[in-house]
Image (tube, rainbow, N blue to C red):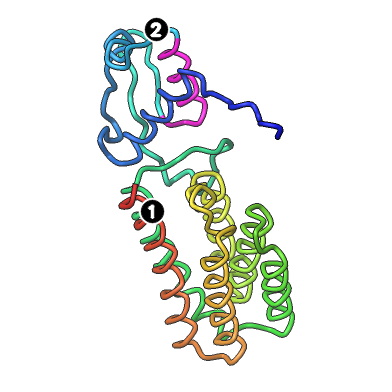
Amino acid sequence: MAFKQVQTKKVSEVIREQLEEMIREGEVKPGEKLDSVEKLAKEFNVSRSAVREALSALRAVGLITIRQGEGTFVNKYDFSNMIAPVTVERIISKQEMLELFQVRKIIEVGAASLAALHRTEEDLLEMKAALAEMEQAAGNEDLGEKADVKFHLALARATGNSILKDMMQQLSDTLGKTMYESRRIGLFSDKPTFDRLQVEHEAIFHAIENQDANKANEKMLEHLKNVENTLIAYHQDK
């Protein structure tokens, strides 16, 4: 029998993951200062160079800011960047994630109602194509996520409101750069979860197809709440 070589993580990577989890769970809040490199090295019982490497990795994804002579501070995600999305992937804290879902519910639930009233046959074909892509992408994180985004953007275009369409485009860009939570918990690779997502999207589509604004509103809210609850449950189970 051939055994695969066990890959061990670098010390700096383990430290980075622990610090990232502390920030994600709100143990260290945005704006707060982390302990000094020396203190962190003692707490983790590692070298200062390993701590510095971990902090550099966190800075690279925009999670912290290192100020010369002042220390290391946890960044608060600036949602105004939705008009100029971040250019690197980074995580957001649990609280920021909840706030982002509040924004999604405000914008996308209303968009679903509007799309039901103004959609064209061309809009329906776009949404239908996205649903077909989503179904074919079962088990593939990247393709599933792209098809999901494509569906929501097609829905935004169906509203006939150019401002709303642009807002949804920027929101989707920001989500893609910040919320790789969905990828971490297998939102698109876990079959039961994937199947549920497919059913929810189809229900939204049929409400829009039937020009039922109230039903479209209801189904979009139900969908966003379910995704949000899945993410919350993941955090609570950790």
Q: Earlier in the sequence, mark 1 or mark 2?
A: 2
Q: Residue 2 appears at what percent x and percent y? A: 71, 32
Q: Which residue occupies 43% across, 20% down? A: 55
Q: Residue 233 appears at what percent x and percent y? A: 35, 58
Q: Which residue occupies 52% across, 91% down? A: 212
Which kind of residue does numbered mark 2 sit on? Ser
Towards the viewer: 199 or 153: 199
Which kind of residue does numbered mark 1 sit on? Tyr
Towards the viewer: 2 or 219: 2
Drawn side of residue 133 relative to residue 90, left or right:
right
Q: Which residue occupies 49% across, 81% down? A: 113
Q: Is residue 59 above or below residue 114?
A: above
Task: Check the image and name the residue furthest to the front.
Answer: 1
Q: Which residue occupies 55% across, 44% down? A: 177
The local crowd at label 2, few if under 14, some if 14 to 19, many if 20 or more residues have their Cα within 10 Å, is: some
**Residue labelled with disc 1:** 234
Q: Residue 145 appears at what percent x and percent y? A: 61, 57
Q: Is residue 169 above or below residue 197?
A: above
Stretch of the chain drawn in magenta: 50-63
Q: Quadrant of residue 210?
A: bottom right
Q: Is residue 54 magenta?
A: yes
Q: Is residue 104 above or below residue 173?
A: below
Drawn side of residue 72 relative to residue 143, left or right:
left
**Residue labelled with disc 2:** 47
Q: Residue 141 appears at what percent x and percent y? A: 63, 54
Asked which secondary structure carries label 1, the reply is helix
The local crowd at label 1, few if under 14, some if 14 to 19, many if 20 or more residues have their Cα within 10 Å, is: few
